[in-house]
Structure formats: C-alpha cells, structure tokens
Amino acid sequence: METTFKFSFIEVFNKKALYMKVREILALSNLEVKTPKITKIADKLYKIFKDNYIFYINHGYYQFKKV
C-alpha cells in the first residue's frame, strides 16, 4: 500500500514538474509553444522516466544505455 502511494505521488508530482520545466526551457528560448505540444513533450519524457524508475525499483540499480 505504501509503495503504491509513493509511486502515485511521484507520478503526479513528476508529470507536473516536467511540464513546468519544459515550459520554462521553451520560454527561455523565446519560443511560443501551445499547451498541447508541451503536454505531448512532457508525456514522452515522463514515459522514459517511468520505465527507468520501474527498472530501478525492481533491480536496485539503473543500467544506462550507451549512445
């Protein structure tokens, strides 16, 4: 129960934080981007975060991919 609560809280917090950070970066770059586009970007970034976070919880470490 506690783990589910923590994950849900982290999920909501991180989606909002990502959205605000993307909006801030775009504003600093003097780019006018509409909210749906920012939401789409934040959702993609959050999916990457969520997948990696679940791997970390299950295995106790994170394995970085070589680029």
Image: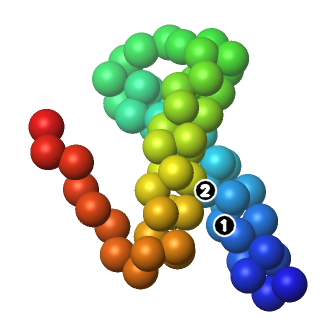
For label 1, the residue is 10
Q: Above or below — where is 24 with respect to 36? A: below
In this rendering, the answer to whether 7 lies above or below 46 is below
> Is 12 drawn above or below residue 32 in the view shown?
below
Looking at the image, which residue is at 41% across and 80% down? 60
Residue to which mark 2 is pinned: 14
Outermost residue on the bottom side: it is 2
The structure residue drawn at horizontal position 73% and vertical position 57%, both measured from the top left corner, is 12
Q: Quadrant of the C terminus?
A: top left
Whether residue 20 is visible, yes or no, is no
| Residue 36 versus residue 53 in the image, above or below | above
Q: Residues within 10 Å of mark 2 (few under 14, many from 20)?
A: some
Q: Quadrant of the N terminus?
A: bottom right
Which residue appears farthest toward the front when viewing the image? 59
Q: Residues within 10 Å of mark 1 (few under 14, many from 20)?
A: few
Q: Position of residue 29 (x, y in %)?
A: 32, 23
Percent position (x, y) of residue 58?
52, 73
Whether residue 57 sits left or right of residue 7 in the image: it is left
